[in-house]
Image (tube, grey):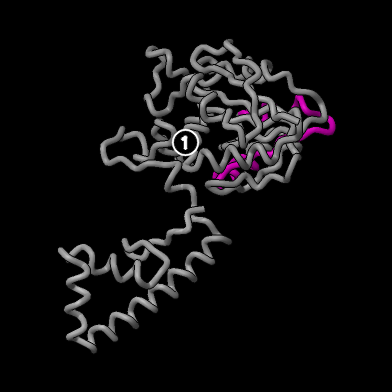
Amino acid sequence: MNPRVELGGVWGKSGWDVFARLIGPWSVDLKQDISMLRLCPRLVLSLVVLTTGLSAYAEERVSKDSVAPVPADSKRYEKRPDHDPNGIGKFYMGREIAHVMGFAGAEWLERSSREEEERLTLLVRSLHLKPGEVVADIGAGSGVISMRMSELLLPDGKVMAVDVQKEMLDRLQENCETVGVRNVEPVLGTQDTTGLSDASVDMAIMVDVYHEFEFPYEMLKDISRAMKPGGRVVFVEYRKEDPTVPIKEVHKMSQAQVRREAEQPEFGLKWTETIHVLPRQHILVFTKQQ
């Protein structure tokens, strides 16, 4: 924790330090300025009151800071005015975060050509799901992937379908009811939390969504918290290494970038394998360490 407290651009804990920095920007000779202040008792008194108050405020802020540190968001993320129009101008570990697909894009997620383009059946088969497992579909949208996985988890397993958009979850629930799927549970998350219980998930999967997380560090930390030891975290992302993949650049991720972000020590995730069976995406699998 940095013990220095910022007071409108003024740093320091002692009243003297605050005073010195208040007058410093306009002072050529600080000692000479102090000598001159002896001729102005009222000004001196005012400055003493001001600096004492600022000092007390600073000490109070330092005390609070020891309990509630400055959010790390400002250190992890960078805002750049010059950026891809398909991104939000926020960068994480050198990568620009993409705009989120809203509820208006639900029909695109459910398009009939998606099976041919992305081979969803092959994707789900490649995951080697087992009956009884609990799978978290992070960024589940309208449930296309959730419903495909749910059948393989019967009779006792289930899919926790996490999304931040209530409209998406409502549509997902309607879709499940239409086809008679009963082991998919909608979970309303936030921009930085999943809403999942600790150590409750056997596998978490993110299909073309991780690159859109506004807070990828916080989300991955929360996903890791929800994983059982030995559980798998799966990223499905369009291949940035392949210029022929017809997707906007900010919606692609390279294997190297995914690993760089996922294998930070605090997450406890270790790369296990990359599965190359899909025409446009790669499937990166990480294992939660014991």
Q: Residue 150 colored magenta?
A: yes
In front of the other: 208 or 181? 208
Q: Amino acid at mark 1?
A: Glu
Q: Residue 142: tell me if it is visible.
A: no
Q: Residue furthest bottom?
A: 42
Q: Is residue 285 visible?
A: yes
Residue located at (76% from left, 24% from top): 152
In the structure shown, which secondary structural element does the residue marked by tag 1 occupy?
Answer: helix
Question: Quadrant of residue 287 in the image?
Answer: top right
Is 18 in front, or is 80? 18
Residue found 75% across the figure and 40% down from its top = 199
From the top left corner, tell me how far across and down residue 228 is, in percent.
75, 35
**What residue range appears in magenta?**
145-173
Quadrant where the C terminus is found in the figure: top right
Nearest to the observer: residue 49 or residue 278: 49
In-image side of 89 versus 198 (left or right): left
Q: Is residue 270 magenta?
A: no
Relative to 190, say whether 123 is above or below.
above
Asked whether, in this view, residue 287 is left or right of residue 42, the answer is right
- Residue 145 at x, y percent in the picture: 62, 28
Classify 7 as above or below 74.
below
In terms of depth relative to the viewer, which is nearer, 209 or 14?
A: 14
Q: Residue beneath label 1, please? A: 212
Q: Locate residue 231 relative to residue 210 in the image: left or right.
A: right
Q: Residue 61: x, y in percent?
A: 47, 67
**In the image, what residue occupies the spot 47% across and 17% down?**
239
Q: Is residue 278 above or below residue 192?
A: above
Looking at the image, is 136 positioned above or below residue 61?
A: above
User: Residue 215: x and y, percent?
Assistant: 49, 42
